[in-house]
Amino acid sequence: MVARTFVLLSLFALPLLMQAQPKPTYSVQPDGVVAATLPAAILTDSDVQKRLTSGLTTTFLIAARDRTTNAVSGARLEVRYDLWDEVWLVRRLELDRKPERQRIASMADLEKWWRTPLRLLSTDASRISLQLDLTVLPFSAAESEDARQWISKSGGVGTAGGGGGVVDALIGTTINAKPITSYRWNVELALK
């Protein structure tokens, strides 16, 4: 009886949970470029919000995979709140553009910047079966490399025998920290 009730509740709850996850919107730009606008709800997620206001960089990695051809491309957004100047420092890296850096004065302006479509991949196909993965990381690639170098240098100071195990443990728990959150969306798009 309990198992059957659980199964029935699960059947009703599953569609509600699936609808609760925010979804990106998609557009087709000139030359067959598929772009996505990420949901603003991601910025207001409590775990993401806490990280965004910490003064450390938060990285949003977006991987787009054409499920038909397995072609993969993507974009990266980096966001850091400068506690001293009280501005957002943002960086956008897209499919076929130079990295773009900006200073943003308010959360409202950050949300506006966030709603700019990201150029993800280019295709000649008339339809595409797209898988979009978003991973929110608690650091940037540059911070990761800086930390790796700093830990490696400081791990060997004053230790007999090198201390490689300590360095490896610090790198494994600090730099390779698990993502804050992640999302996956699948969509079928008609491009022409």
Image (tube, grey):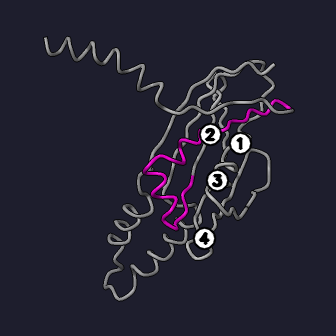
Quarter of the image with the N terminus is top left
Give the residue pinned by disc 3: 108
Residue at x 56%, y 55% (from the top left corner): 59
Q: Is residue 110 above or below residue 155?
A: above
Q: Position of residue 159 (x, y in %)?
A: 33, 85
* Figure disc tally: 4
Give the residue pinned by disc 2: 38
Q: Amino acid at mark 3?
A: Ala
Q: Amino acid at mark 4?
A: Glu
Residue 111 horizontal side relative to residue 45, left or right = right
Q: In this view, which residue lies farthest toward the right? A: 30
Q: Position of residue 160 (x, y in %)?
A: 31, 85
Q: Secondary structure at mark 4?
A: loop
The label nearer to you, 1 versus 4, is: 4
Question: Which residues make up the magenta segment?
Answer: 31-59
Q: Which label's residue is closer to the chain start, 4 or 3?
A: 4
Q: Secondary structure at mark 3?
A: helix
Q: Which label's residue is closer to the chain start, 2 or 3?
A: 2
Residue 30 horizontal side relative to residue 76, left or right = right
Give the residue pinned by disc 4: 86
- Tell me how far mark 2 sits from mark 1, CA to CA: 8 Å
